[in-house]
Image: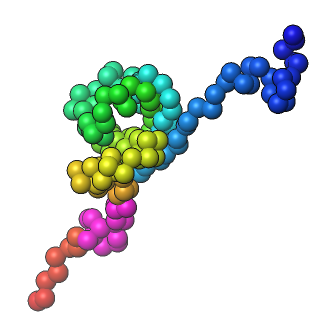
Amino acid sequence: MKKSEKSEKGKTKKAKRRKKKKIVFTKAKKKRAVARAVIKEGRGRITINKLNIDVLQPKYLVDFIKEPLMFLPQEKLGVVDMNVNVKGGGFMGQAVAARAAIAKGLVEYFGDKKLKDAYLKYDRLLLVDDVRRVEPKKPLGTKARKKKQKSKR
């Protein structure tokens, strides 16, 4: 039988063997940082900007980004790969955005209401983006709200 020959239902044997893999795309923002995460079937690997998460420095940021994984049971943790791409902002804003993108992706991938409630109870910013932005500086002042002191006399 040739590769191009089709079986009775119109699908090739190779296409029959291939099963549909579940893939979830999510994004999260914090200030100027934008994180895009891809959660898919795998072996439990986590990469941030194509680097293994354990290689990143400082270590407290690694622990901070891994916080959403604390709520997952071990059997669920080993079945998904997480690839996060982060651009813009500073290192802390990027960490918050990556953490939120991972949490949103896990909730969507597993469709678990208990997991979503646990995230909301622990820290709402895991599932809801922080909409606060830096206020622009105005004229006649050194900062956004600060003005020069005015003398009355």
Q: Quadrant of the N terminus?
A: top right
Relative to the observer, which residue lies in front, 85 or 25? Answer: 25
Q: Quadrant of the C terminus?
A: bottom left
Vertically, is 32 above or below 83? below
Measuring 38% from the left and 56% from the top, which residue is drawn there? 129
Residue 130 falls in image quadrant: bottom left
Give left or right: position of 9 versus 90: right
Q: How many marks?
A: 0
Q: Is residue 27 visible?
A: yes
Q: Which residues are magenta?
A: 131-145
Measuring 80% from the left and 23% from the top, which residue is drawn there? 12
Residue at far left of view: 153
Magenta stretch encompasses residue 136? yes
Residue 20 falls in image quadrant: top right
Q: Picture coordinates of residue 27 (x, y %)?
A: 47, 47
Measuring 72% from the left and 24% from the top, which residue is drawn there? 16
Q: Picture coordinates of residue 70 (x, y %)?
A: 26, 36
Give left or right: position of 109 versus 67: right
Measuring 13% from the left and 83% from the top, which residue is drawn there? 151
Residue at far bottom of view: 153
Relative to the observer, which residue lies in front, 40 or 148? Answer: 40
Q: Is residue 85 visible?
A: no
Q: Picture coordinates of residue 57 (x, y %)?
A: 28, 26
Give left or right: position of 80 versus 150: right
Vertically, is 50 above or below 131? above
